[in-house]
Amino acid sequence: METHDVIILGAGAAGLFCAGQAGQRGLRVAVLEKADAPGKKILISGGGRCNFTNLGAGPGNYLSANPHFAKSALARYTPADFIALVDQYGIAWHEKTLGQLFCDGSAKQIVAMLIEECPKDRVTLSCDANVIGVVRAGDGMFTVSVTDGRVWRAPALVIATGGPSIPKMGASDFAYGLARQFGLKVVEPRPALVPLTLGGEDALFRELSGVAAPVLARAGSGKNTAAFAEAALFTHRGLSGPAILQISSYWRHGEEVGVTFLPDAATDWLLAAKRDRPRTHMRTLLREALPARLADALADRIGLDRELGNIGDKDLRDAQARLADWRFAPNGTEGLAKAEVTAGGIATAELSSRTMEANKVPGLYAIGEAVDVTGWLGGYNFQWAWASGFACAEALAAAHAKGETRQP
Ligand code: FDA
């Protein structure tokens, strides 16, 4: 049996970063990871180059039952802080688009940096340590056991086992079961940043598989709505591409999504075209502005396939309106197998937004994707992992200084 000041479950982005920060503050930390190596999701992230933060990351870029929850942590560890760390390690990076920062080289550099950040004499990383049981004894100590029978003890425990998206990588809902075991509520988990599937009438659009176009995509209802101007991609199952992945986090079963094709077109562009080029066919006009296969599919559905001069103004206005708000009724998503993240998770109402500690279970903390805080596509989820890990490490150090995490 090994005894430490804190046990961190999961050596992903949040767990590794928190371990380094806690170790640097003098705590003796055990990190338990079920995979044979740490940071596997980091390694595959950003197409192998890890989109490690976003210059514009702020609370407005996250979904949560409590949109205010992430404010404190995000303000205390910012993208600039993480960039300074990356620079300190001489890791070259670039902004790809929309504030998204990627390594020039490889995501391996980020994992190596996070490991290097863990002081060797204070942080012990154990891989192949699949945690199966956690109990808390009367003396306040957490006892953690793994499949091969090894056992660790500590007065503080951090849940950093992420969410269940991409189960083939070993991702699971372990965090939720553990949270419930300690009486914490879990907000219904659901796949997010995930392709949407089309059926019924919309299924015909699947014939456009491989076609991409810039769009403005909208989803959600009430306060929970969002619109993203990026590319959409038709797939053999439905819709994907950055604009669709973004709105998928806001979409709920049974709702429609709205897509504006030609988002930069002027309001009365079809009427203007009728005036300027009355002999042009609707289909030709659409083909000039959109990929041919998409233009044909839209022209077929609009059904005004004749010269613009022979189409009434009302019909043109209706066509404009339809192109500006094309309604799709997705019949589902591609599920956790294809979801970049899981939305929902350990309820923020159960945690302190300053420390990530469970309100009713002192000594128990939760960070990263396990918590009901879900970022947009574009480096926001890693920024949450760093920021929540940092807030937790600071709190662990403060509790340790007060003697609260010292072993009895
Ligand atoms: P994470 O999943 O990283 O780590 C959890 C760890 O806990 C894992 O190592 C797991 O093996 C371990 N674990 C689970 N159960 C356990 C148990 N019972 N015992 C012991 N260990 C256990 N985000 C972003 O900002 N930029 C990007 O470029 C990308 N790209 C990207 C690509 C792909 C393909 C995916 C799937 C995801 C992304 N993301 C992303 C999202 C990002 O990877 C994710 O939000 C963070 O990795 C979450 O960090 P966590 O540490 O919370 O969980």
Image (cartoon, grey):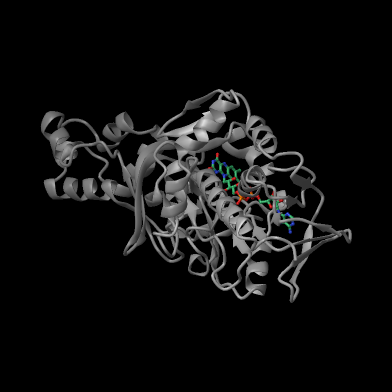
> Image check: 215 left or right of 368?
left
Against 352, residue 289 (above or below) is above
Q: Which of 94 and 355 is in front in this view?
A: 355
Answer yes or no: is residue 376 visible.
no
The number of numbered badges drawn on the structure is 0
Question: At 44% from the left edge and 57% from the top edge, which residue is drawn?
Answer: 63
Q: Which of 33 and 143 is in front in this view?
A: 143
Question: At 49% from the left edge and 37% from the top edge, which residue is drawn?
Answer: 81
Farthest residue, direction right: 149
- Tell me the quadrant of the picture where the N terminus can be found: bottom right
Question: At 21% from the left edge and 31% from the top edge, which residue is drawn?
Answer: 280
Against 82, residue 153 (above or below) is below
Against 112, residue 167 (above or below) is below
> Image check: 68 left or right of 337?
left
How far across and how far down the image is residue 256, in percent? 38, 60
- Tell me the quadrant of the picture where the C terminus can be found: bottom right
Farthest residue, direction front: 402
How far across and how far down the image is residue 14, in percent? 61, 48
How far across and how far down the image is residue 226, in percent? 35, 53
> Image check: 328 left or right of 384?
left
Against 111, residue 138 (above or below) is below
The image quadrant that residue 68 belongs to is: bottom left
How far across and how far down the image is residue 24, in percent? 64, 42
Answer yes or no: is residue 383 visible.
yes
